[in-house]
Amino acid sequence: MDKNSKHAIGIDLGGTSIKLGIVSDTGRIHKKTKLRTEADKGPKQVIENIKTGIKELTNNSKYKIEGIGIGCPGVVTPRKGIVENPPNLPGWKKVNVARIIYHEFEKEVYVDNDANAAAIGELTFGSGKKYKSFIMITLGTGVGGGIVMDKKIYHGDFGAAGEIGHISINYRGPKCNCGSFGCIEAYAGNQYLRERVRRQLKNHPGSKLWKLIDKDLNKVSPRNIQTAAEFGDKFGKRVIEDLGLQLGSAFTSLVNVLDISVFIIGGGLAGFGKPLFGSIEETLRARVMAPIRPRVKVLPAKLKNDAGIKGASALVFHHT
Amino acid sequence: MDKNSKHAIGIDLGGTSIKLGIVSDTGRIHKKTKLRTEADKGPKQVIENIKTGIKELTNNSKYKIEGIGIGCPGVVTPRKGIVENPPNLPGWKKVNVARIIYHEFEKEVYVDNDANAAAIGELTFGSGKKYKSFIMITLGTGVGGGIVMDKKIYHGDFGAAGEIGHISINYRGPKCNCGSFGCIEAYAGNQYLRERVRRQLKNHPGSKLWKLIDKDLNKVSPRNIQTAAEFGDKFGKRVIEDLGLQLGSAFTSLVNVLDISVFIIGGGLAGFGKPLFGSIEETLRARVMAPIRPRVKVLPAKLKNDAGIKGASALVFHHT
């Protein structure tokens, strides 16, 4: 019953929903809840909803809470707990989330961006446990990144480090919504990937994917690309292999710059599984400098469901 | 007369020559010498030559020496002073340079790779003095890099970090001799640049460069490219602008990953001057995320001649 465990509240603050849980320091969720973010009503309402969620969890709870961890989108100043201009949360500019929640509950509050929280989650409970340094990549709508150096998140001088999604792999490549060109997000981000596949599919009239989407290009999705590949469809396989080459190339640059050779991959596209991981590894082994090759590891994230809640709670355990 | 200064010996160990100097902690060279490396005779002879050089400097010297700093090519384990497989120094494998020199002279010995020594040189005596974090790039035969984080060189877990030259800007680009593709070194490295210009020049029969090389493509060099550009030659200007775009793109990825926004550029190609620096800055300002743009700085290295000696000596001052 985890009697000797410590407990924290982990909060995954997203554009659509707020997910909260009481998590033990062994990574077990004892109680959880979910509320609508109501992002359109502005920061005050969102914070009201966070408070309601915390109260729901702690009412009549037997667990002593060590602290509250919050994973947010956007740029976060972790030392101060300030969240700046989070995408999907309109009207925020700068909000000192940590101070507001602390005043209400008198528990230490730790805030970091969701990609860093995911990395800390893997470091504390998941695939990163036994590594001193690794890079966590979350392949979702965007491509999130967190750099763990010497068991700590590397935040950089201004808290903006770790934007792995915005490494360019092609300086004359497709425009990315960050303003740059050829960013890995402009290849692997969900929308970019779908659009590219839609364009390319027209040149592959024999692909099994056509049947899986009922000839409706709007239905192209990572899931049916994967199904096509699993049925042996050449085009579907190529899409996944290409993605591995693109990610592997960005990772090679990271190895050369940071001398970090362990990569942990989560998020929806990690579901492509072995064909994707194999292609990334093959690219890395072919491209990183010879002495480093034996150290290269590409691992799937261990935390799947509730990764956001667990990662946010790990922000607390990582500090205590 | 620098009476209160501290002094160190700085040694720039290259494939052709060994340059040594007594340097004060204000960056003044009081005495210097130069010997042939005789790399072909193997590590024993090279180390003998280093010792001879040190003795030349210290005989009848009035300066109290705090320590000895050595900048080497290749991968260096700075904590241990071991140099591994330096290119241009055949037969080395692993040599514990620090221990050998320490035994002879009983002075502390600090060894690091030449690109990191250059960065420490700029941090201690040059353009990096007032910055907490910056990235130093040396544009020479290869493209060397050193990452200064929080006033310290970032070495990575295995001492191989900072290979800025091997960030890929085009995952399907030209093959680099490191094994990867589209590395910035495969664009900006001296030989790669010359070869590319030779190829491209054939499509520009009206370029002033033809006259400058007496129609002999073997004579293409950074210097005559620069002269052509200074005479208003469109092709020459384009070469330099393209190089700025390529470097600027690699630097954009670095800003996004490391949240470091100051770049110091040294080495031969830094001689392209304003047209190159302007193009790099323009690329960075167009491509890095909006909140970071005002922080971006691209500076020329301050140490020019004897940068190798001064950087190596700074390895000592940086430790004392």
Image (cartoon, coloured by chain):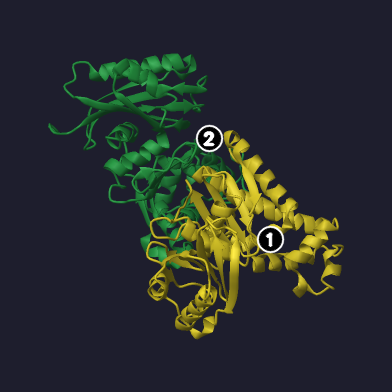
Chain colours: A green, B yellow
* Figure label count: 2
Q: Which secondary structure, mark 2?
A: helix
Mark number displayed over residue A218: 2
Q: Which label sits in the foreground, 1 or 2?
A: 1
Residue B259 appears at what percent x and percent y?
A: 51, 42
| Residue B237 visible | yes
Residue A251 appears at what percent x and percent y?
A: 47, 53
Three-letter code for the amino acid on which mark 2 is drawn: Asn
| Residue B167 visible | no
Quadrant where the image shows the C terminus of chain B: bottom left
User: What residue is at 41 percent from the left and 54 percent from the top?
Assistant: A260
Residue carrying label 1: B269
Residue A29 appears at what percent x and percent y?
A: 23, 31
Please rate how many residues cluster around mark 2, counting C-alpha atoms within 10 Å: few if below 14, some from 14 to 19, many from 20.
few
User: What residue is at 35 percent from the left and 33 percent from the top?
Assistant: A308
Q: Which secondary structure, mark 1?
A: helix
Tags 1 and 2 on a common chain: no
Toward which corner of the image does residue B166 lie, by quadrant?
A: bottom right
Toward which corner of the image does residue A139 lie, by quadrant?
A: top left
Q: A35 or B142: nearer the eye?
A: B142
User: What residue is at 57 percent from the left and 58 percent from the top?
Assistant: B2
Q: B114 or A276: nearer the eye?
A: B114
Three-letter code for the amino acid on which mark 1 is drawn: Leu
User: What residue is at 22 percent from the left and 16 percent from the top?
Assistant: A59
Mark number displayed over residue A34: none
Residue farthest along the bottom direction in this orientation: B41
Going by the image, does A66 lie left or right of A293?
left
Which chain is home to disc 1?
Answer: B
